[in-house]
Image (cartoon, rainbow, N blue to C red):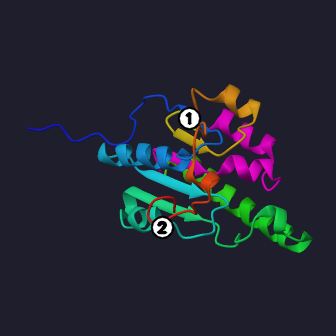
């Protein structure tokens, strides 16, 4: 008789990953890890902060169904630097709701891998308090694998992480006036 297939991390300690830096590929790396996890029957929650534009990967990810769930804040459509006070308050409230969703997903065991895409930007722009994020990372469920992405990872989160990858921009076509291309950069 075949043994039942195990699901989740099954007692294996979940680690914390950070993809940071000024280079292209932080979200791509996180999604790649998420796809690998799906291939091993792990459930993935992808929580995307501060990306209001529909990107090409979203269509594919949303088509994966229950194994790779996508959560986004559709309220934020401007850069923070271009927001007035009222828009900033609305964005802060939206980020707070999305952060609560992310914590609930992790705390309630609804996923094995939780990806917090661009959470560093939400912190650095003042839309999410660093102290709240750091406290939750310290207290996250032990079997939850956590990935956080975005430029300028705060030292406090870097200290809490098990993996930190800094993606450096060495050369980028934008500096030569080549605009972002559909299907490649977004």
Q: Gap between marks 2 and 1, in whole Å?
A: 28 Å
Check if residue 8 falls in the magenta segment. Answer: no
Picture residue at 60% right of the left edge, 43% below the top: 23
Q: Does residue 164 appear to the left or right of 143 in the view shown?
A: right
* Quadrant in which residue 134 is drawn: top right
User: Element type at marker 1?
Assistant: strand
Q: Which residue is mark 2?
A: 182
- Residue at the far right: name it: 85
Check if residue 121 falls in the magenta segment. Answer: yes
| The disc label shown at residue 122, or none | none
Q: Of label 2 and label 1, which has the lower sequence position?
A: 1
Horizontal and vertical percent position of residue 168: 60, 36
Nearest to the observer: residue 86 or residue 53:
53
Residue 113 visible from this viewpoint: no
Q: Does residue 178 appear to the left or right of 88 in the view shown?
A: left
Neighbour class for label 1 at 10 Å: few (<14), some, many (≥20)? many
User: Where is 141 relative to 177, above or below?
Assistant: above
User: Where is 167 relative to 30, above or below?
Assistant: above
Picture residue at 8% right of the left edge, 38% below the top: 1
Region in magenta:
111-140
Q: Which residue is mark 1?
A: 17
- Residue at the far left: name it: 1
2 or 1: mark nearer the eye: 2
Horizontal and vertical percent position of residue 15: 53, 31
Horizontal and vertical percent position of residue 174: 61, 55
């Amino acid at each position: 008789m075949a043994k039942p297939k195990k699901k989740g991390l099954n007692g294996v300690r979940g680690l914390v990953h950070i993809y940071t830096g000024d280079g292209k590929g932080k979200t791509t790396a996180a999604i790649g890890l998420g796809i690998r996890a799906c291939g091993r029957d792990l459930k993935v929650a992808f929580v995307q902060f501060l990306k209001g534009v529909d990107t090409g990967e979203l269509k594919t990810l949303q088509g994966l169904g229950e194994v790779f769930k996508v959560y986004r804040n559709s309220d934020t459509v401007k850069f923070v630097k271009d927001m007035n006070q009222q828009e900033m308050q609305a964005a802060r409230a939206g980020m707070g709701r999305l952060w609560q969703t992310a914590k609930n997903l992790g705390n309630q065991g609804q996923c094995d891998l939780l990806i917090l895409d661009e959470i560093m930007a939400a912190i650095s722009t003042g839309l999410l308090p660093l102290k709240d994020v750091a406290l939750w990372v310290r207290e996250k469920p032990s079997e939850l694998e956590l990935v956080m992405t975005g430029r300028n990872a705060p030292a406090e989160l870097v200290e809490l992480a098990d993996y930190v990858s800094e993606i450096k921009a060495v050369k980028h076509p934008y500096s030569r006036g080549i605009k972002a291309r559909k299907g490649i950069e977004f």
